[in-house]
Amino acid sequence: RENPSFWEFSFPQEVPVYGYLFGTFAATPPEQRPRVRRQVERQQIAELKAPETVDKLEKTEEGSQMVSRVNRFITKWYKQHQKALSYFHCVLDPDSFSRSVENIYHVSFLVRDGMLAVDLDEEHGLPFITPVSATQQERRDITDEKQFIVSIDMKRWQDLVEAFNIRKPLMVLKR
């Protein structure tokens, strides 16, 4: 500590000397161009549209032809056999999961529109489908809409096909 050279060292964080490399700013400011405001294009006010309401089956809607075919098939089958049709035998196609899903979808529309009724078997609790006659439809309250939707995945579909021993589809319709 008594050695004077011990205290003579430069600090590495000294501020460097600042020099002007490019000189000062220009004395005259740059020329400003006049600003031109753009006219905002206003869009024409579109007609207000109300949300589409869910149409009944009688009105034309996409896929209604297929739903009508399903209804005719079930009604014809019911008239020939004079008994309720097993829901799973009707909608399940053992060869195609996608056709089974389509069948479930179409039957749900028929139930919603009151053209089919789904009743549960008292003994086993399984769903059965019966067509609803025109007189029964008229007696039914218009606001009383019911829908029968089944959640199904590939595994459940395979299990149901195996459990009900379905070897060929009951409802074969041209698509």
Image (tube, rainbow, N blue to C red):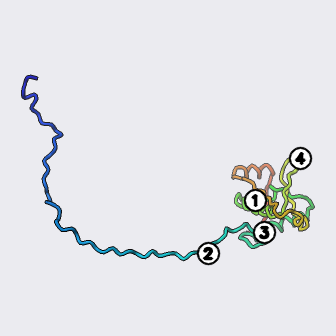
Q: Identify residue for label 3.
A: 57
Q: Residue at point 47% right, 76% down?
A: 41
Q: Identify residue for label 2.
A: 47
Q: Residue at point 12% right, 36% down?
A: 10
Question: How far apart, in angstroms, are the residues tagged by discs 4 and 3?
Answer: 33 Å
The spot of residue 161 in percent (x, y) is 77, 52
Q: Nearer the viewer, mark 4 or mark 3?
A: 3
Q: Is residue 10 left or right of residue 95?
A: left
**Callouts 4 and 3 close, C-beta under 8 Å:** no
Kind of residue indicated by mark 3: Leu
Question: How far apart, in angstroms, are the residues tagged by discs 1 and 4?
Answer: 23 Å
Looking at the image, is mark 2 or mark 4 earlier in the sequence?
2
From where the camera sits, is residue 80 visible? yes
User: Which quadrant of the figure contains the C terminus?
Assistant: bottom right
Quick one: label 4, few (<14), some, or many (20+) residues within 10 Å?
few
Quick one: label 1, few (<14), some, or many (20+) residues within 10 Å?
many
